[in-house]
Image (tube, rainbow, N blue to C red):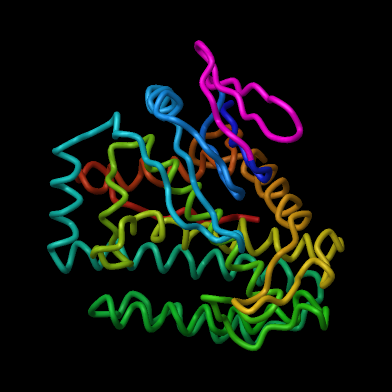
Amino acid sequence: MKKSIYVFNDGEFRRKDNTVFFESENGRKYLPVENINDIFVYSEVNFNKKFIEFISQKEILIHFFNYYGYYTGTYYPREHYNSGYMILKQAEHYLDNSKRLKIALSFVMGAARNIQQVLRYYQNRNKDISDKYDLIDKLKEKISDCKNINELMGIEGNIRDYYYRSFNEIINNDSFKIEQRNKRPPQDPLNTLISFGNSLMYTVVLSEIYKTHLDPRIGYLHSTNFRKFTLNLDIAEIFKPIIIDRLIFSLIDKSMITEDDFSKTYEGLLLSEKAKKTFVASFDDKLKTTIKHRDVGKEVSYRMLIRMELYKLEKHLIEEQEYKPFIARW
C-alpha cells in the first residue's frame, strides 16, 4: 500500500539516481518513491527541477500548508489519466441545472446521513443530543425538495449549524466549547482543529481524484469558478463527519490534544507542532483502517472508500450507474 509522507522539519528535497531524499538538521532520509502516494509539507522546504521532474514521473502530488497548518496549494503533476470524454461529461452535468442539482443533492444527503450516524453513535453513549438529531432529521427531509443550488446550500448550512451545536455535548470539555463555526482565522481551539482537519480531508480527496479520470476543477455542490479545485470539496462533505469529526472527538477525549497545544497570535490561534503531528499521525492511521464493505464483500480502507466514491461518480457521469453516496453503517 502506498503511503503519505508528512514533513514538519525545514530542509531540502533532492533526487539521487532513482530515488529521492529529504535532508534536514536531523540528517538525510531516503524516501521510497515507488511507495509514496503524496507529500504533505508543513515547513520551509527547497527542491530543484530534477526533483520535480522525477516525482512528476512517479505521479506524486505535493500539498503545501501555511504556518497555521492550513492548506495553501498543491503541486499537481500533469494528469496521466486525461480523458477529454470525461471532462465533457463533467461539464455537461454541470451546465445542465437538473443534472447538476441531482448530483449536489446526493452529496448533501450523504453528508446529512453520515452526520446523523455520528450523532447516533454518541446518543448511544448517553450524550444528550436527541434534539439536534431530530432537527437535522427534519431538515434532511427537505433536501430532495430543493429546486436550486442556493436553496440546497441553505439547507446544508442549517444542518451543519445544528450539528456543530451538538459538539459541546459530545466533547463536554470547557476548553473546547464552540459557539458557532468560524474560520479565516478560526477563533477558538475547536474551530482550529476542525479547520486543520478539513484541510487534510480536502487534500486527500484531491490526491484520490488524481488517480481517476475526473477533473478536480469541476464540482457540483461548490460552484465551478476561478477557484482551482472544487470537486474535492464536494466529495469531502461526505467523509468529514465520519473521519475528521470522529477523530477530533477521540483526540480530545483521550487528552492527546489539550488546551495547552494552542497559542494566540495576531492572526489567530496557532496549533503546536506536537499537536499537528499527533493529529496527522492519527488521521493517517484512520485512512489505513479497514472496514467490511457490504457491496464489495471485503475489507477496504477509508482511503479506498474515497477512491470508490469517485469511481461511482464516474459511472454516473457516463450514465452507467446512478450515483449513491457512501453512508456509514456504524
- The image quadrant that residue 24 belongs to is top right
Residue 187, position in %: x, y?
Answer: 63, 81
x 82%, y 72%: residue: 259
Along the line of sight, which residue is nearer the eye, 231 or 291? 231
Relative side of 236 to 223, left or right: right
Q: Is 300 drawn above or below residue 108 in the view shown?
A: above
Instruction: Report the quarter where the C terminus lies.
Output: bottom right
Relative side of 234 to 274, left or right: left
Q: Is 199 drawn above or below residue 186 in the view shown?
A: above
Count the marks: how many?
A: 0
Along the line of sight, which residue is nearer the eye, 130 or 10? 10
Instruction: Report the quarter where the N terminus lies.
Output: top right
Per the rendered image, the range of residues in magenta is 11-34
| Residue 27 among magenta residues | yes
x 64%, y 38%: residue: 288
Residue 61, position in %: x, y?
Answer: 45, 37
Along the line of sight, which residue is nearer the eye, 280 or 161? 280
